[in-house]
Amino acid sequence: MDFKQAFTGHTVRRVAWKRRMAMLARWLHIYLSMASFAIIFFFAITGLTLNHADRFTNQMRSVDEKGRLDTSWVRSPDTSHINKLAIVEYIRQNYHITAAVSDFRIDEVQVTVSFKGPGYAADAFVNRQNGEYELTITNAGFVAIINDLHKGRDTGKSWSWFIDISAVLLALVSLTGLLLLFFIKRKRASGLIVAACGLLLGWLVYSIWIK
């Protein structure tokens, strides 16, 4: 095999490799984009609602409740004997609360229990002497729920994992799109210029109006 044949064979293999890489990048970009379409749409919409959260404060609703629970659960001078489970389950069952307990505090006068969820809060204040309590339940509305989901606030570990997976998917969509651009010779320069302009625009907004 002479040098010309070796060079030609190398060129053919290189072209074939580029073609396979371009097909792979295109396939990944298309199907990752489709798989993450709903995710992109959700985080785009909630980005807008978060940026204008003050316009949706009228959706907030609060309800105040009063009652009395078993004094034996809270009256013991030894705080280690406070029946935390009974208190939490009593409040859950009577007021249909499904949110997680975010805080449980005990002092000399009262027991405070807080439940938090996306767009939701319930705070109970229990008198340790007589078992009487006051409960405030706050529903901040649908927009507050999706805003908290966007931020991952009071959403638990499962949703935290979902956010991490979503972030990886969106990063892969961006990277495969950029990789695909390098295989499109006619659009490569203009595409990179547009990408650079986007980065420059973000930097200018930060430098001029924020920094």
Image (cartoon, rainbow, N blue to C red):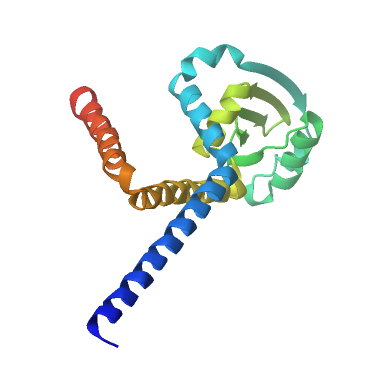
Q: Does residue 210 appear anywhere in the picture?
A: yes
Compared across the picture, whether 99 is left or right of 39 comes to right
Task: Say which residue appears at 46% left-offset and 47% top-offset.
Answer: 173
Query: How many numbered dots are placed on residues in this image?
Result: 0
User: What residue is at 37 percent from the left and 65 percent from the top?
Assistant: 15
Q: Which residue lies furthest to the bottom in this view?
A: 1
- Residue nearest the viewer, comparing 157 with 62: 157
Does 46 sit left or right of 121 as displayed?
A: left
Judged left or right of residue 24, residue 134 is right
Residue 63, compared with residue 8, is above or below; it is above
Given residues 166 and 59, the one toward you in this image is: 166
- Residue 16, given in percent of the width and then of the height, sits at 41, 67
Report the quarter where the N terminus lies.
bottom left
Instruction: For residue 160, say whether it is visible.
Output: no
Residue 103 image position (x, y, % from top left): 58, 40
Q: On the rendered image, what quadrant is the C terminus found in?
A: top left
Q: Position of residue 156 (x, y in %)?
A: 60, 45
Give whichever of 196, 141 is nearer the camera.
196
Q: Where is residue 89 in the image (x, y as percent from the top left)?
A: 76, 41
Q: Residue at x 45, y 63 (%)?
A: 20
Residue 140 quadrant:
top right
In the rendered view, tell whether residue 76 sits above or below residue 111. below
